[in-house]
Image (cartoon, rainbow, N blue to C red):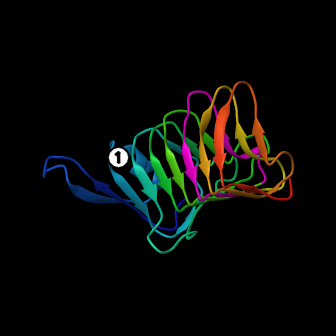
Amino acid sequence: MAQGTVQVTHTGTSRWRRRTGEYASLAAALEAAADGDVLTVAPGTYRENLVVQRAVTLRGPEGAQGSVRIAPADGVPLTVRASAVIQDLHVEGQDAAAPAVLVEDGTPELLGLRVVARSASGIEVRGGARPTVRRCTVDNPAGVGIAVLDGGGGVFEECEVVAAGQAGVAVRSGAHPRLERCRVHHA
């Protein structure tokens, strides 16, 4: 369960649509949000497996990078299936059979994420997904740092794989990522 709250700012063209709501869990906030909404997550540890299926902005509080931890006991902590913006979160994955961050669809933007895992992969991109990943750090001494598979793509800019128990970056099965100014250590 969450230690904090999630504030959802509903945006829209109608002045009746613009309002703010607070939710006790990220899952409840994601369920209530619509495309274009902004979810601001209060500092704390959230033990939830998140699935982002709408084009929302999910971010930690400004100026407090790393204060929001997504850390479920097992499974994929963060799955993105939409053209969302995910910003300034700390994601912890503990499942050796699953990635810590899984991007399956859309053209999301992942900005300033810190992924600390003992997972199959730190960040995994599959299929038709084409994310833009900027200034993200992956520390996964048990598995692959960044994996792009099954025709996936995307742009990785100024990302760093601090440690990887296997390959720092793995590209397989027709995948075609573009890496710019990225660094890989201890792979």
Q: Which of 113 and 45 is in front in this view?
A: 113
Q: Which of 68 and 104 is in front in this view?
A: 104
Rendered location of residue 80, percent (x, y): 53, 41
Report the side of 171 relative to 40 (left or right): right
The kind of residue tagged 1 is Ala
The image quarter containing residue 97 is top right
Please state the total of marks drawn on the protein image: 1
Disc 1 crowd rating (10 Å Cα; few below 14, some 14-19, many 20+) is few
- Identify the residue shown where x is 25% and y is 51%: 11
- Identify the residue shown where x is 35% and y is 47%: 33
Q: Nearer the viewer, residue 165 or 136?
A: 136
**Which quarter of the rendering shows the N terminus?**
bottom right
Instruction: Work out whether 149 lies above or below 3.
Output: above
- Identify the residue shown where x is 65% and y is 26%: 151
State the SS at label 1.
helix
Q: Which residue lies furthest to the bottom in this view?
A: 63
Rendered location of residue 25, percent (x, y): 46, 56
Instruction: Work out whether 13 lies above or below 163.
Output: above
- Identify the residue shown where x is 66% and y is 32%: 176
Q: Mark 1 points at which residue?
A: 32
Report the side of 57 relative to 176 (left or right): left
Instruction: Work out whether 83 lies above or below 26.
Output: above
Residue range in magenta is: 118-138
Residue 108: in magenta span:
no
Q: Which of 49 and 124 is in front in this view?
A: 124
